[in-house]
Every structure is written in structure tokens, then in C-alpha cells.
Amino acid sequence: MPAWIKYTISVFSICTVLFLGLNKAGELARPQDFDSDVWTNYYAEEDNTISTVLIGSSSMYRYWIPTQAYEEQGYTSMLIGTAAQDIRLAPYLMEEAAKTQDLDLFVVEVRSIIIRGDVTKIKDEHYNYRMEVMTSGMRPSSTKFEMIQKYYRADEKSKFELMFPILKYHDNLLTFDRQVLIDRLNQGTDEFKTGRQRSKITKIKEPVFESDGQLHLSDETLGYIDDIETKAEELGVKVLLVATPYYPSKGQASKQLQLDEYIASKGYDYLNMNNVLDELNLDYSTDFYNSKHVNIAGAKKVTTYLAQYIEDNYGLQSKLTDEQKQSWTDACDAWADEESSLMAEWEKYKKENE
């Protein structure tokens, strides 16, 4: 073998080791925030074992219990859900998710268009923080690079640091408790397969959706839906758009109806669960923890309905071997204990509110 080829291979090997090392160090240094664990939890799942990925903000992850869906319908799912998630990021998250899993379906929550309004008006520091936390566990890639370049509101130096989190968060390696670093080094799949519910109860009114006759959503905003559909088609994966139950303000109700009309005009697969409230059997005195999110009792009802809807319309199949099923069996057992604790707290709140 010529010397120059050996040299090239050696340089390439060293660069690869350095790249992998920087990436692993970045994972260890990421902020201590559940949202920073979303991607590391996702990557921890064995390749090609997940059937569907659910993407969105708390309007998604507070409503879906992956282990319950698995027990009831037999297919696997994971949440790529982060607080105040910008819907414009969905196509990038879909692309990244498809790199390690042979997915049959994306479920994308679209209510953030209604609740968050014009994302360009959100203060830079607030917007950037949520994006920083969400991307901190994401592997360096062209997908991540394009997303940061387009939407992260900072100079090029800061964008580069976010691309390689060890550059931004290296001080954490010195300040984190030793046990945190050990736990992250030994981190496996998420104990609950990304389930994260709450027990608190807040009584809310039954929602009313009426139009005020005005068009609140711009063509640009509605175009975000088209971007999601375009990416799904590019990836060859079906996509279901979802709006989860909530109590809207008058303006939000009008926006919701405009969004519904637009999606219907495009013929996209769409489930607005605010239109199937009787089937969901939600109790507005006990099943919400605030006007925009369900609690554990509500999440169980939504998961049962949505999991069945997905099965009826997409016929997802389990991709697990007997050995791989054990991971989900263990997660279901762990969630059973967690759910029991959450429901006990829910019962206390219920009695206090009677």
C-alpha cells in the first residue's frame, strides 16, 4: 500500500476518533434538563425497533404514554417532545429521527401554531434557550447544522458552539456532581420510554370553538404545515397531524378553525381531537392540570383513543424480536409503578377539589 494512502487513512482515523470523542463529551456536558435528554434517549433505542415518532411541544408529550400504547396496541413509539418546541423545526427532527429508525409513521402536533403565535416575536433569549437545550443531545450532522443556521438567533461563533455542545457546555464537566457524569456514561434506554405526565388537577370549562370572522394565521405560518408534509414525502414516511384537546381563548379558537380549514383543503391526514370529545370521555373537572394540558388521567384517555386511531388507520406492526421485547416489558413494569404513584396523587387532588 502506498505511503500516502496509509497516511490518509491514519489522519482520517484520528479525525474520526476525535469527532466521536467530542460528541461523547458534549453528551456528558449537556444541561440538566429533561429536554436535553430527548435525543440521547432516542439514540439509545436499538436501530429499527421504533414504529412511530411523535413530535411536538408539551401539547404532545403530556398527552401520550408510549408504554400504554405498546401494551394496548403492540407497536412501539417514542416522543421527540420538548417544551415550547418551534413547529418550524419539525422537518429537521423528522429527518434526524429517520436516520436510526425505519419508521412507519410520524405524528406531529400542530397546536403550537395556535398557542405560541408568531414565533419571530418571542424574545431571543427565551427562544434560543429552548433550542439550545433541545439540540444539546443531538448528534452533529448536516441536519443539525442546517437547522441551527436557519433558526438559531446568534452569531456564527455561537452557532458553531451549539453544533458541538462540548464547546458551549464544557464548564459543566467541572461543576456537575460526579454521579451525574457516571449515570450519563452508563445511560441506557429511558426507563419510561419517554413518558412524562403530571397528576395535578385544575377544573376548566368545556371548550367552545367559534370563529370571529378574521384570518389570524398568515400564509407563511400555514406553510409550516406544508413543510412537514413535504419532508414526510421526501423520507417516504406517512405523517398524521394532530391537535390535542385544550381550552382556547376566543382568538385561539378562531385560529384553530382556520388551521382546520387549511389542512382539510390540502387533504392532509389530520385528527383534531377537540372534535371527538365525546369519544375521548374527558372530564373537564378532573382530567386537566391547566387549560392547555391534560394530567395523567386525561393522558390515559387520550393515549387509548389515539393509539387505537393509529392502529385502525395505519396498521402498525411490532418490529421487535423476543429479546428486544424485554426492554419494553421492563419499561411497562416501571411505568406501572410510576402511574400508580401519579394516580394516587391525582386522587388526592380530586378529593381536595370536591
Image (tube, grey):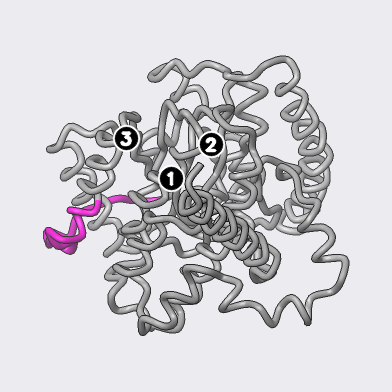
Determine the image quadrant of residue 167. bottom right
Tag 3–tag 1 contact (CB < 8 Å): no
Residue at the disc numbered 1: 244
Residue at the disc numbered 2: 302
Q: Which amino acid does label 1 sit on?
A: Thr
Q: Where is residue 192 in the image (x, y as percent from the top left)?
A: 72, 42
Residue 351 part of the magenta-drawn span: no
Q: Can residue 205 be seen in this view?
A: no
Q: Say which element carries label 2.
A: helix
Q: Position of residue 63 (x, y in %)?
A: 55, 44
From the image, state whether disc 3 or disc 1 is nearer to you. Answer: 3
Q: Where is residue 135 in the image (x, y as percent from the top left)?
A: 50, 63
Q: Position of residue 3 (x, y in %)?
A: 50, 52
Q: Left or right: where does residue 8 sit relative to residue 176?
A: left
Q: How far apart are marks 3 and 2 (CA)?
A: 28 Å
Tag 3–tag 2 contact (CB < 8 Å): no
Tag 2–tag 1 contact (CB < 8 Å): yes
Chain-order first, disc 3 or disc 1: 3
Residue at the disc numbered 3: 235
Q: What stretch is highlighted in magenta?
A: 207-224
Residue shown at 19%/54% (left/top)? 222
- The crowding category of the residue bearing disc 1, from other C-alpha atoms within 10 Å (few below 14, some 14 to 19, many at least 20), is many
Determine the image quadrant of residue 266. top left
Residue 211 part of the magenta-drawn span: yes
Chain-order first, disc 2 or disc 1: 1
Chain-order first, disc 3 or disc 2: 3
Q: Left or right: where does residue 225 sit relative to residue 30?
A: left
